[in-house]
Amino acid sequence: MSPITSSYSNEMHRIDLGTIDPNHHNAVAKHYEDAANEMKAKLQTQKELLQEYEKHSYYYGRRGQDVQSHTAANFASMKNISMRI
């Protein structure tokens, strides 16, 4: 996992969980469900972008290969994070 993804992920959870009482289990469970749903939505977006780049790579020229590999890396990273949530 990249340091940027790691710090973003940890920062997001630190801010949100800081406002929730740890003894309020329903609120904590809802927080994690919301985080998981958000990651699934982002993962779906990245998957759709990757499919678009693979179908129409000729639209993007040389830069398209860089964008495609970057999107594939983002997809793999988000998939790995979503499995752990």
Image: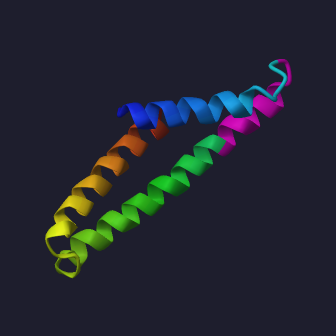
Could you tell me what secondary structure mostly forms the magenta stretch? helix
In the image, what residue occupies the spot 29% across and 48% down? 73
In the image, what residue occupies the spot 44% across and 37% down? 5
Front residue of 73/85: it is: 73
Residue that sits furthest to the top in the current view: 23
Is 36 colored magenta in this rendering?
no
Which residue range is magenta in the image? 23-34
Front residue of 15/23: it is: 15
In the rendered image, residue 69, in percent from the top left (x then y), is placed at: 22, 55
In the rendered image, residue 56, in percent from the top left (x then y), is placed at: 23, 78
Q: Name the colouring of the figure.
A: rainbow
Q: Tell me if 56 is positioned left or right of 7 in this view.
A: left
Above or below residue 58? Residue 22 is above
Residue that sits furthest to the bottom in the current view: 59
Q: Quadrant of residue 76?
A: top left
In the image, what residue occupies the spot 67% across and 41% down? 33
Q: Quadrant of residue 6?
A: top left
Q: Quadrant of residue 54?
A: bottom left
Above or below residue 1? Residue 76 is below
Quadrant containing the N terminus in the rendered view: top left
Above or below residue 57? Residue 21 is above
Q: Tell me if 1 is positioned left or right of 34 in this view.
A: left
In the rendered image, residue 48, in percent from the top left (x then y), is placed at: 39, 67
The answer to whether any part of residue 85 appears in the image is no
In the rendered image, residue 50, in percent from the top left (x then y), is placed at: 31, 64
The answer to whether any part of residue 30 appears in the image is yes
Front residue of 38/59: it is: 59
